[in-house]
Image (cartoon, helix red, strand yellow):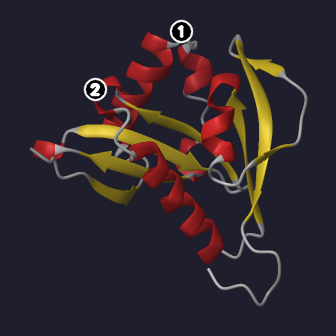
């Protein structure tokens, strides 16, 4: 049976509860990220997306900061492998284009580099640790010239 998954732009603090639930489960509980690092005070200024499943269950999220940094992408374990992360990323890329950004960037966990590379991100840094997890900074060009439409 196919489950319907909805994707929408979310707002902070109106959607803080479902967004926080997902991030707490994935980053704090699964990956051991300290809560003060995960909830860094930048959420009110960010654009957020929320994926929901049956019964409006929150299943995935992502945010984009005004700097063009994409981050805090998380999909709850039972929902992984269904293309949810890719669709969340596409939502952010579409918004970045609509906001006139030429590039976006992110700090990718080292075991996720291939995922982002498949979405046309390329590595622009050496390995570094964030919250005890190895990362590399990656960049993606949104449009190479003014002639390119979103």
Q: Secondary structure at mark 1?
A: loop
Q: Farthest residue toward the bottom?
A: 147
Q: Position of residue 134 (x, y in %)?
A: 74, 18
Q: Tell me if I can see residue 121 in this picture.
A: yes
Position in image of residue 25 (x %, y %): 38, 20
Q: Which residue does the numbered mark 1 point to in the structure image? A: 32
Q: Cβ–Cβ below 8 Å for labels 1 and 2?
A: no
Q: Residue at x 41, y 54 (%)?
A: 11
Q: Is residue 26 left or right of residue 124?
A: left
Which quadrant would residue 75 be assigned to in this image? Answer: top left
- Neighbour tally class for label 2: few under 14, some 14-19, many 20 plus, Cα within 10 Å: few
Q: Is residue 115 above or below residue 50?
A: above
The percent position of residue 19, horizontal first and vertical second, equals 38, 38
In the picture, the disc for residue 1 is: none
Taking the spot 50% from the left edge, 20% from the top edge, the residue there is: 27
Q: Nearer the viewer, residue 117 or 7?
A: 117
N-terminal label among 1 and 2: 1
Instruction: Tell me: residue 105, above or below residue 38.
Output: below
**Circle 2 sits in a helix, a strand or a loop, which is it?**
helix
- Identify the residue shown where x is 89% and y is 35%: 125
Determine which residue is flagged by label 2.
78
Residue 79, quarter of picture:
top left
Q: Quadrant of the N terminus?
A: top left
Q: Position of 30 compared to 130: left or right?
A: left
Q: Is residue 14 visible?
A: no
Q: CA–CA distance between discs 1 and 2?
A: 19 Å
Indicate the quadrant containing the C terminus: top left, top right, bottom left or bottom right: bottom right
Is 55 situated left or right of 128 in this image? left
Q: Position of residue 23 (x, y in %)?
A: 44, 28
| Image quadrant in which you'd find residue 55 | top left
């Amino acid at each position: 049976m196919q489950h319907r998954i909805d994707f929408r732009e979310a707002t902070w603090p109106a959607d803080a509860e479902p967004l926080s639930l997902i991030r707490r489960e994935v980053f704090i509980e699964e990956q051991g990220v300290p809560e003060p690092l995960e909830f860094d005070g930048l959420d009110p200024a960010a654009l957020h997306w929320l994926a929901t499943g049956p019964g409006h269950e929150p299943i995935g999220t992502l945010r984009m900061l005004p700097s063009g940094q994409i981050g805090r992408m998380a999909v709850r374990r039972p929902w992984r492998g269904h293309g949810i992360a890719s669709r969340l990323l596409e939502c952010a890329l579409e918004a970045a284009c609509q906001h006139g950004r030429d590039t976006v960037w992110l700090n990718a966990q080292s075991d996720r580099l291939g995922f982002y590379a498949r979405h046309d991100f390329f590595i622009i840094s050496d390995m570094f640790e964030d919250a005890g997890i190895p990362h590399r900074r990656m960049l993606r060009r949104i449009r190479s010239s003014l002639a390119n439409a979103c």
